[in-house]
Amino acid sequence: MDTKFSNVTTLVVVSCLSNLDSLVLSHNQLHSISKGVFSHLPLLNSLELDGNKIHTLDANAFSGLEANLQYLRLGDNNLHVVPSDALRPLERLRHLDLRANNITMLSDDTFTHYGDSITFLNLQKNGLKKLPPLVFENLNSLEKLNLSEQQTKSYL
């Protein structure tokens, strides 16, 4: 389902779409993702939320998607931190796009307990100032990491 550029401002739980595999909510006016809003979409494999104004993700925002979500695009939003509490339960997440947010700092445990599934991580254009030496240590399956266009002064 593609709702790009639809000026969506609020998400509500929709239970009639339980077989949905892909949901595109890019380039709307979303500011936050509430608890369980996707809980009735257990087969969702791909979720595109890029190009919104998201600054807050509830720790249970992706509840119900733990077993199937593999592709998550959260780029071009207004996140100031990696929403680790919301992302950690996504045990099959392979592709995580957090490009062009306002994430300026990562801690050693930012990606702890993400499991072995993430193969692609995009942190491009975030203005990261420093990268802790162990920040990516637990991403055992990581194949592609994009850190371009940062203000980083201290590298791995």
Image: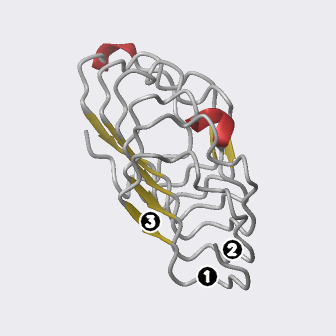
Dot placed on the residue nearer the N-terminal end, 2 or 1 = 2
Badge nearest the viewer, 3 or 2: 3
Which residue is disc 1 drawn over? 150
Residue 107 location (% of width, % of height): 76, 55
Q: Is residue 28 above or below residue 59?
A: below
Q: Name the residue: 52% across, 74% down.
A: 147
Residue 7 location (% of width, % of height): 46, 53
Q: CA distance from mark 3 to mark 2?
A: 14 Å
- Amino acid type, mark 2: Leu
**Residue 127, disc:** none
Q: In front here: 101 or 146?
A: 146
Which residue is disc 3 drawn over? 145
- Amino acid type, mark 1: Gln
Give the secondary structure at mark 3.
Answer: strand
Give the secondary structure at mark 1.
Answer: loop
Residue 101: image quadrant is: bottom right
Residue 112: image quadrant is: top right
Q: CA distance from mark 1 to mark 3?
A: 13 Å
**Residue 128, disc:** 2
Label 2 neighbour load within 10 Å: few <14, some 14-19, many 20+: many
